[in-house]
Amino acid sequence: MAAPLDLDQLQTFCAIADCGSFTEAAKRVYKTQSAVSMQIKRLEERLGQPLFARDGRRVALTTEGEGLYARARRMLKINAEIIDMFSEGDLSGNIRFGVPDDYAVKLLPILLSSFQRTHPKITVDVSCQPSEVLLKGMREGRFDIIVFTQGTMHEFGELFRTEKMFWVASHGGRALATDPLPLACGPNFCIWRADAVDALSRINRDFRIAYTSSNAMAITSAVLSDLAVGFLPESALQPGMRVVGEEQNLPRLQDAQIALLRASHAYGGIYDALVTHIAESMGNLPGSERKETEAAE
């Protein structure tokens, strides 16, 4: 019978995969760089396959490493769940949490205030940024958990919510009747922008990018001020906005997909408490249907 894999080696392996650096991973797992290198060497010898391809200071997962990554994450998650089963006492600690500002105005205060009431010994430090910035911050080790827009150049995370996307304009404004149609949207990497542009192009609707910002409130202000037409998920709609659609020659948009992403250490204990609270408060996908796709960055 083959000996079981070493969970400490798998934790180190996942940390390297998350940040793409042995040096940075060593800081995250509180080991020397030589100790980290030795752990990966032993893991590769144990499995008989190279797990990382090295390119200067950066490393990337090999095909074999990609196959191991999701499974290693699951093992770390199960390990944390077992430890929690036999743990006693109140949960306490600090969580670094990132969330897109699309959801910060309406959902975040309700979400975190209710979490604070049920878990008074857990503190949550919140950063509101675009999804791509949050994903970059996760790679750099600045977050424990983030909420992000699934599909934003990244198929990775635990999908827990979908929302309809709507075209929005100001009530009584003239932007909707302007030709070409002025758009208020996020920067080039925004998945919602890409979908809107593709949808307009498919129906040959002329448009121009009139207002660009990575800040959701700035987009909202541009729409309410009648500078442009925008597109937002249902939970981000604001008073004073007019929802418009096919009757104004605007195409149907794909649903927004909202996902959670954890750092490789963020399983069990305080982290599961926050993830469960978010999924129960914001989620609209049954637990049995919730998708979890994990791939290397």
Image (cartoon, rainbow, N blue to C red):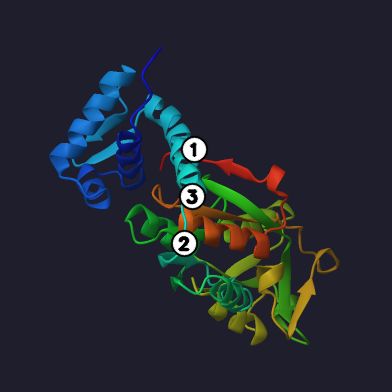
Q: Is residue 260 above or below residue 36?
A: below
Where does label 1 land, which residue? 74
Whether tag 1 and tag 3 are in contact, CB under 8 A, the answer is no
Q: Residue at x 60, y 63 (%)?
A: 277
Whole-percent x, y for residue 125 in the image: 42, 72
Where does label 3 land, which residue? 84
The image quarter containing residue 221 is: bottom right
Q: Is residue 52 above or below residue 193?
A: above
Classify residue 43 as left or right of residue 282.
left
Disc 2 from disc 1: Cα separation: 25 Å
The three-letter amino acid code for the residue at tag 1 is Arg
Whole-percent x, y for residue 255 in the image: 70, 56
Q: Residue at x 63, y 43 (%)?
A: 291
Q: Residue at x 40, y 26 (%)?
A: 63
Where does label 2 land, which residue? 89
Residue 190 visible in the shown view: no
